[in-house]
Image (tube, rainbow, N blue to C red):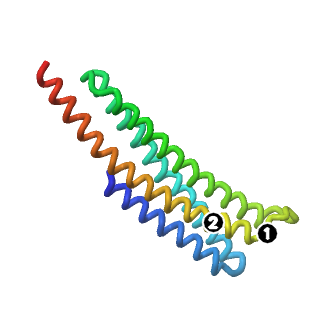
Amino acid sequence: MLRVFWGLALADGIVLVGAALLGAVARGERGVYQHVGLGVFAALLTCLVHAVVFTYFTATGKMMRQALALGKLDGAIDARIRRSKQRISRAVAVAVFTLIVTVAAGAAYLRVPGSGVPGYVHVTAALLALAANLWAFAVEAGLIAANAALMDAVFTEYQRRMGKS
């Protein structure tokens, strides 16, 4: 999963940076529409990548809990599973929230005359969103690696115990 994740995160990071750079150089109506199109695509792709990670943790957590219950394994492992999912949830929430703020600020700047939202608010939100998502990718990668090791340990112990029955 880690290699798949890094492939998705790299592709997404390229699209996010591309949207930001296109916004920085956009001139005229066509350039702005290209930036908006790429920006919306980047936001959707980023949400998809985070949703894949969250789904991975949900599914593997359920599988490990099932193995813990059936194999009567150490219940302390369940606490580790829950902590990992909580950390993933926080990272995803921060990353997606910053994207929502960025998209909303950009839309308000472009489409609501007299909204009082200056362009620098969108630019600042975009930079924060980029930083937050890169941070979230790093957190997610570390937790995916730790989760893989935990799954190996849980399922190895499960097979060992169930083989004795």
Residue marked by disc 1: 118
Q: Is residue 43 above or below residue 150?
A: below
Secondary structure of residue under mark 2? helix
Query: Which residue in the rendered view is the most extreme toward the right?
Result: 114
Residue kind at label 2, given as amino acid type: Ala
User: Given contact means CB atoms under 8 Å apart, are the residues at marks 1 and 2 in contact?
Assistant: no
The residue depicted at 40 percent of the width and 33 percent of the height is 79
For residue 55, side relative to residue 161 (left or right): right
Tell me if mark 1 has few (under 14), some (14-19) or many (20+) residues whose alpha carbon lies within 10 angstroms of its own: some
Secondary structure of residue under mark 1? loop
* Residue 2 position within the rendered picture, expressed as x and y whole percent measured from the top left: 33, 54
For residue 49, side relative to residue 38 (left or right): left
| Closer to the camera in the image, 89 or 29 | 89
Q: Is residue 148 above or below residue 9?
A: above
The residue depicted at 58 percent of the width and 76 percent of the height is 21
The residue depicted at 64 percent of the width and 66 percent of the height is 36
* Residue 106 position within the rendered picture, expressed as x and y whole percent measured from the top left: 71, 64
Q: Quadrant of the C terminus?
A: top left
Question: Residue 126 shows which numbered tag?
Answer: 2
Residue kind at label 1, given as amino acid type: Pro
Sooner in the amino-acid sequence: mark 1 or mark 2: 1
Q: CA distance from mark 1 to mark 2?
A: 13 Å
Q: Is residue 140 above or below residue 83?
A: below
